[in-house]
Each structure stands twice: as C-alpha cells, then as structure tokens.
Amino acid sequence: MSNNKEIDSKKGKESISGDNPKKNGLTQKKIRIEISPKDKLLSIVHKIKNGNFIKEVENNIFNQEKKESNGDEQVLHVAILKSIHNLWNGKGHLFQITCFYQLIIIYLEVVFHLLTFQSLDGKILLPIVFAIPVGAVLGFISGIFGKQLNQVLIWIFTTALCLIFSTQLVYNYVFKTFLSIYSVGVVGKDVLEFFDQILAAIGNNLIGIFLLCTPLIILKILMKKKQIDMNSKPIGSQVTALTCFIVVQFFGVLILPIFGKETYSPYDIYHRTWVPEMSVEQLGVLTSTRFDVKRLIVKEAGTTLNTGLLLDNSPKTIAAGIKENKKDTVNNKNSKEKDVVKKAIPTPTPIDTSPNILAIDFEALAKEETKETVKMMHQYFASTEPTRKNKYTGMFKGYNLIMLTAEGFSPWAVDKEITPTLYKLIHEGFVFENFYTPLWWASTIDGEYVACTSLIPKSGVISFYESGSNIMPFALGNQFNKIGYSTRAYHNHTYTYYKRQISHPNMGYDYKGVGNGLEITESWPESDLEMIEVTMPEYIDDQPFHTYYMTVSGHMNYTFHGNQMSTKNKEAVDHLPYSMEGKAYIACNIELDRALERLIGELERKGIADKTVIALSADHYPYGLEKDKIDELAGHKVEENFELYKNQFILWSGSIKKPIFIDKPCSSLDIMPTLSNLFGLSYDSRLFMGKDILSDSPPLVIFSNRSFITDKVMYNSKTKEIIKLSEEELPEDYISTMNKIVNNKFLISESILDEDYYSYILSIIK
C-alpha cells in the first residue's frame, strides 16, 4: 500500500513540476491551486468536444475516492463530481433522454419563431417553459422499455418533432396560416395534387428546414458516441422525475398573468379565446398543436357569451357611406350641366324600414330549451339587433343571379386595357370602395364558406364540409329553390376537392365539377372561359336561375412554366414593366376576364342582361405572390394587416345605368345578407354574422386574427394599435366592447356549425 502511495506521489509531482515541491516551499494543496479556473474550464470544454467528458468524470471520481484527504475543498470537489456522474449516468433517472428532448424543443421553438415572426420578445419564455413538461413526457415514454425499443422511440419522436416544425414553416410560407391536424386527414390527399407547388415552397425554405432538422444530426452524434443511456429505467424513479417536470407545466400556467389578462394576451389565448396565429406566436407550436388536437377530439364547452353586447352601441348614421352618382363615370365625364326644369314633385312612396326578421321568438325558445349551448344561442339572437329594410330591398326581385367566387382575384389583376371586362364591372353597378376579403384558415374553401353563408369559419376544421350534414336554409341555393328558381353550381377543378360534393348540394345546388359531369380540357389550372362556355347552355334558358361558380384560373403558382393559363395569355402581358411573377399573375386572370366577357355577351344576346345580376368576390388575396411582388403591382409598399386584404366586390346588372358608390367598410361576410335583401328574400338578419351593406347598421369588418374595422377605428389586434377614422371621441370602453362583440361572432358561428343550430328553428322558418 505504501509503495502505491509513493508511486502516486511521484506521478503527481511530475505532472505539475519537474522540481521537488518541498524545495519550492509549496504544499500539495497549494500546487493544485496554481491551476486557474479558466484553465480548468478550457480543459473541460476540450474533453466535452472529444466525447470523453463522462469517462473523465468517472475516472476523477475513482481517483479522488482513492486519495486520502480531509480538506473541505477536496470533499466539495468529490461531491460535485459524484453529483454530475449520478445525474448523467446513475440508475433510475431520466436526465439524459429528458434533457435531450427539452433542449431540442426549446431550440425548435426559438428557431421557428425567428424564421416565422422574425423577432423574439419576452413571451418566448412561455414556449420555453412549456417545452420542459413535453420533454419530460417524451423522456418518460422513451425510458420505460428495453434498450432497442427506446432507441427506436427516440428516433421516432425526434423525427416527428422536426417534421411538425418544418411542416408548419412550409405551410405558413404558402398559405400564411398554420396547418391543423384535422385538415391533414380531410384534405391531405387533395393537397398532393399541388405536389409541384409544395416542392417549390420546400426549395424556398431549405435553410429553415435544415435548421429545424438539426436535432436529428445531434441525436446521431450523441448515439454514435454513446452519450445517451437508452437502457430501461426503474418505473418508480421515472414517475417521480416526471411528476417534478409536470409541475413546471402548472408553473407556466401560473405565470401567464405576468403578460396581462386582457383580450388576446397569452392568458386569454390559453384559457378563453382560441386564435391559432396568436397561439403559435405566444404559446408555441407544440402547445398550439395540443390545443388543436383537443378541439378536434372534444368540443369546447362552457364558453360565456356577452349576450348584453349589441353591435350598435354607438349612434347610427342613416345609410352611412352610401353615395349615389356623386362621382363621374365613363359615361358622364364630359356631360355639361343643363338648366333645371321645374316640375311638380310627386309624393314619394314611403320606404319600408321595418326590421329584416322572421317571426322567431328567441326568448320563448330559450325558456323551453334544455341544452345549455343552444339556450345560450337563443339568448344571443334575442339580444342581437337586426338590420332594417331600405330603399334597395327587393331591387332585384325576380332577377337571375350569377354568383362567382374568383380564385386569387384582387385589384392588382384589373387593368383598363388588359382586363377590360373586370375594369368595366368594378366601375359600374354598385361600386364598393372599402371592401375587404380576409384570409381565413382553410384558404379557398373558407373564403367560399364566408361568402356563401355569412358565417365565420371554425379554425382547425373544413367548415364547409362540416356544414354538409347540417340544415342550411339561408344558403342562396336553398332560398332560390324555394321560390321556383333553377339552381346550379360549377367548379372547374376536381369535384371532390375540399369535399364540395357534400357541401354544395347541401346548399341547394345541382353541383358539377371535373369528374362528375363537367367536361373541360385537362390542364393546370383549368380554364374559366371554357367552364363558362360549356355550362351556360345548361341554365341560360331555364329562367329564373341562380348559378354559382367557383373559378380556378387565378390559382398559383404564378409562373409561365407552372401555370397554363398564364402561359396561354403570356403575350398580352409581355410589355408590362413587372417581374415574371407579376406578369404571370395578371396573365392567368385574363382568363377570368374573358370568361366574364363571354358571359355578359351571351346575356346581352339573349336579351336578359338587364334582368340578371353578377356578384363576384375573391376567396382570398393572391398569397402565392411574394410580398415584394404584391408591392410591385400595387406601386407602393402594401400595409399587411388591413390593406393587404382590401379587394373588390363586383355587384353589377345591366339595369343599373349609373354607378352607386359605397364607401362604407364591408367584407365578404356581408355578401349573403346584402344579396338576400336586394332580391327580397325571406331571411332573419339576426342569424347572419355579416350585415346588409346597404342598411343603416354600423359597419364591422372582421379579420381572422380578430383585428377589425368600424366606422370609427381600425384596430390591429396584434400590435394593439388604434387608427381613428373620425374626429369623434371614443368611449373609454369602446375597444374592449368591440373585442367582445367580435369574439361573440366567432363563438356563435362556431356553435351554429357544431350544434346544427338552424335545425332548431327549421319548423318556424318553413
């Protein structure tokens, strides 16, 4: 034993100095102190890089325990080394696997935020905190089985995490929203039709995808160097560790009020108001995914509506925003004032301004209803103020109606020379100067749903498809069917896309698309012009008629090699001073312009243009264009929260000789009630989320992120910025009241869909 000590002593001396330490007047303890903390740290870093850190820790513990010393520093040193060893390689713990998951989730959340939102703020703390319990759960699952199965699980979970974040990155890049689990199941197969566009989006995000897949590389390195123990751990220790980490979840929930409890705060998003975009930004991708799954499995209950809040708490302005013939048009630019000839003024016919409602006693229904959610909805509609009839009520009674939802249409596609029919239509008839087409979660099909139902789509599902099993009495197909119209609907792409074969017949239409009766040339995208030419003979002599079209020629990608409609019309845009994408976008919309030209020409040839109404709106703005290309077409930098969604609503008839200008803010949510009033249909305005634009009701434009526009303000829910539109002093609680009104509309729209609410009043409205 003494010989061993002597050998150790010699080795220790030689490793530090070639001289005898006693000759230098230094003790063994002092010699150790001569090694600076900086040198120790550099040594540890070097060992970690070489993958020898854990082995070095084990060797140090072994060597230190063999040495005899009563010094406090040495005891502490040994204790620390033992703790590190036990924490990393001890039996019955989850440190390695759990920490790996937690660190990569934190990394993914931070990188995703930077890639998607281009900034970080204090709220990034929440995704970081919520990453800890998620990592604990995954670590628990990856440690309860045998070594081989645990290794398979850690690869599966890590790959799944990277895939979730990468998929959301690409999906958001294309659709400007986030993917829901539900959508993957319902329309996943349909999306594969756009495989080339998906590949293009992936190509544009390769760096981001690489960064989000880096955890797979790290895992490979760690596994190769055997730095993660994948052996099974005792269940008792795992449960204890898991419980400790889950406590962090509750801690995360407890600290939510730090950021406030106001509307759209992290607290509000977590507990009350589900807004996907805000949830991802404030709570993180994984927490939002958890809520998405929860909403898919369990319908949320117990949401409280502010039933006492009505839309018009502020003073009304009669027919606000409606101006007739106060601007020059193409036909009267050079007209001169004529002498006014005094004539006897006839007694005006009184205008019916009674409420646009049906004989529904919602209060009585609420008293009799036992289902709490439906009872709450009855109470809401009882408290909602209806719009009133006006001088435009029944203006188009007995007319034919052709309604179109135009794929990717926007004002940037309109040019007097290149798209003259579109130019003509937006400058004649009703001219809506402040019309908006918000972008909703399910893109095109949600845009259709809003225009056709005047309901806000439910996030996370395909609302139109879900409505296919509901009673939809106010859909225009059913409304016109009831009064003897022939009703047809067409879509010039696959008839099953977004399950339209379920939703559109349920709206009262005889529906045809490619694959179930609509025979047109196969291309991508298909021709709007050809669809009009093929279908007009089916209905034009079957009057009165209501025909609905969902077009596709304006679909992305906007290139001359990936869009056959752009290629077809390329020559017409070659001279324009725009980028290739800008030219291609205008070129594919020429097909829509020519389709409308052909349609109007046939109506005029049949002599029914003055007895037919054309109503056209977009499904969404052309998000397939990069923002700089949109700025290029607009001629200035387009503001992204409001202006980006500003669009045109074409409402034209050959019978309107002079334009009627409307500068009242309005949106696609208002189309259904406006058309219902103009055609004198029987409906209850309280049951729509939009309003008759031509009524005296105050305007309300709602966006998917809960921003809104009224006649008084533009409110940005993301930045909390308020832009006043008038000099009128706002009540102190105006914004909070409007936020509650907006939230009510989201909740009621969702409940109408989930509860099949119209079925509860069907016997009354028949």
Image: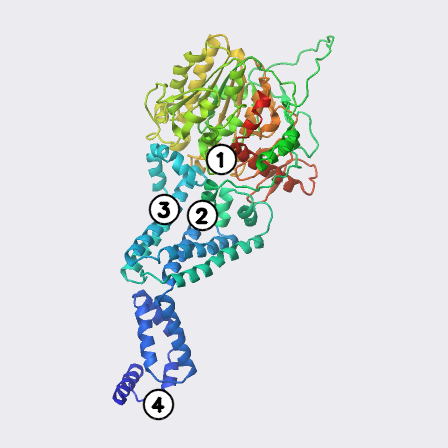
In the rendered image, residue 591, in percent from the top left (x then y), is placed at 40, 22
User: What is the x, y in percent for residue 81?
Assistant: 38, 73
Find the distance from the CA under tag 3 to the CA under tag 1.
Answer: 24 Å
**Secondary structure type for disc 4:** loop
Instruction: Look at label 3 and name its amino acid.
Output: Leu
Secondary structure beneath dot 2 equals: helix
Q: Is residue 208 visible?
A: yes
Above or below, 311 relative to 505 = below
Report which residue position mark 3 lands on. Answer: 163
For label 2, the residue is 285
Provide the residue designation for mark 4.
24
- Please, what is the three-letter code of the amino acid marked with disc 1? Trp
Upstream in sequence: badge 3 or badge 2: 3
Q: Earlier in the sequence, mark 1 or mark 4?
A: 4
For label 1, the residue is 440
Up-down relation of residue 7 to residue 544 (above or below): below
Do the CB atoms of the residues marked 4 and 3 lie less than 8 Å apart? no
